[in-house]
Image: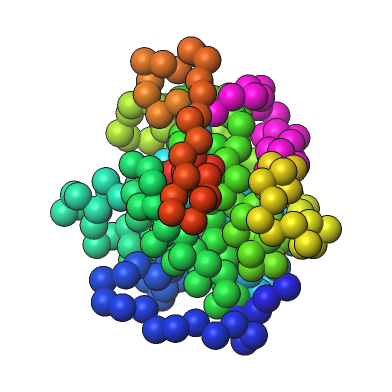
Amino acid sequence: MATGSEASVAPLPAKVFDGAGASQERLRRVLHPLSRRLWKMNIEGIENIPTDGPAIICPNHISFFDSVFVMTFVGRNISFVGKAEYMDSWKTKHLFPALGMIPIDRSGGGKSDSALEAAERVLRRGELFGIYPEGTRSRDGMLYKGHTGAARLALKVGCPIIPVGIVGTREIQPPDTFFPKIGLECSVKFGSPINVERHADRPDDHLAWREITDEVMFEIRELSGQEYRNTYASKKPETLHAPTAVVSTQDNAGRNTSDLETSAP
């Protein structure tokens, strides 16, 4: 497994988002007691988070509060990828990067490469990186087929994947609502690390990516108790219940970019 001391990372050019920092540490000190006061929090499996070294945190995604609670209770700085559209608002373009959000362009082709390169740098520094394998928020509460970006990163860096099952955040903030409901129960369960070393000799094999991803999604389902749908989640509410398909596209390196999609809060 790579660690921060083993990795050599080139300095980032200006205006490149490079993950969580001191501002997240300060925010976590505030949110930890505040969250327990406002909601009935049940946190399990925190011992599964390595105390140092890189790891990829893979939660299910049902609410904006998923990122808030994972960041609050994971115990270490964690960086997430998020929709680049969040950078268009003056309200969020400074806040979200300060909290560790790395914007990703989801329009296809090779446009997401810079975010994924930043994610790799985060991991090679020995830090935590969070990615939602479903690629977008589930608007009906079901668990959807995972994209393979997390598996690819784990194989490339040589770090474990921690599945996370979150229950209750959808009730705290239902879809298309702004203000959260107070006093409700919420559970965040960190599962046992998934070691990808057995696939280390197949870092560029899409079948290996899919095997790891399917294992991650199975563990998330066990932790969250969600109903699973073996189809990719739709980003459009109007096609929520329609069968969906992902058209595979390739960048200049021949990589399947449809599997790189990730979502922010």
Q: Quadrant of residue 161?
A: bottom right
Q: Is residue 247 above or below residue 10?
A: above
Q: Is residue 181 magenta?
A: no
Q: Quadrant of residue 196?
A: bottom right
The residue that appears at 46% across and 34% down in the rendered structure is 137
Of 91 and 197, nearer the camera is 197
Spot occupied by residue 193 in the image (x, y as percentages of width and height): 75, 56
Q: Is residue 215 magenta?
A: yes
Spot occupied by residue 141 in the image (x, y as percentages of width and height): 54, 25
Of 116 and 193, nearer the camera is 116
Residue 28 visible in rendering: no
The residue that appears at 37% across and 24% down in the rendered structure is 236
Magenta residues span: 212-233
Q: Which quarter of the rendered picture does the C terminus lie within?
A: top left
Q: Is residue 113 above or below residue 20?
A: above
Q: Which quarter of the rendered picture does the N terminus lie within?
A: bottom right
Residue 230 visible in rendering: yes
Relative to 55, 116 lies left or right? left
Spot occupied by residue 16 in the image (x, y as percentages of width and height): 32, 70
Relative to 66, 142 lies left or right? right
Of 95 and 84, nearer the camera is 84
The residue that appears at 60% across and 37% down in the rendered structure is 146
Q: Quadrant of residue 134?
A: top right
Q: Is residue 262 above or below residue 47?
A: above
Spot occupied by residue 126 in the image (x, y as percentages of width and height): 60, 75
The residue that appears at 52% across and 50% down in the rendered structure is 255
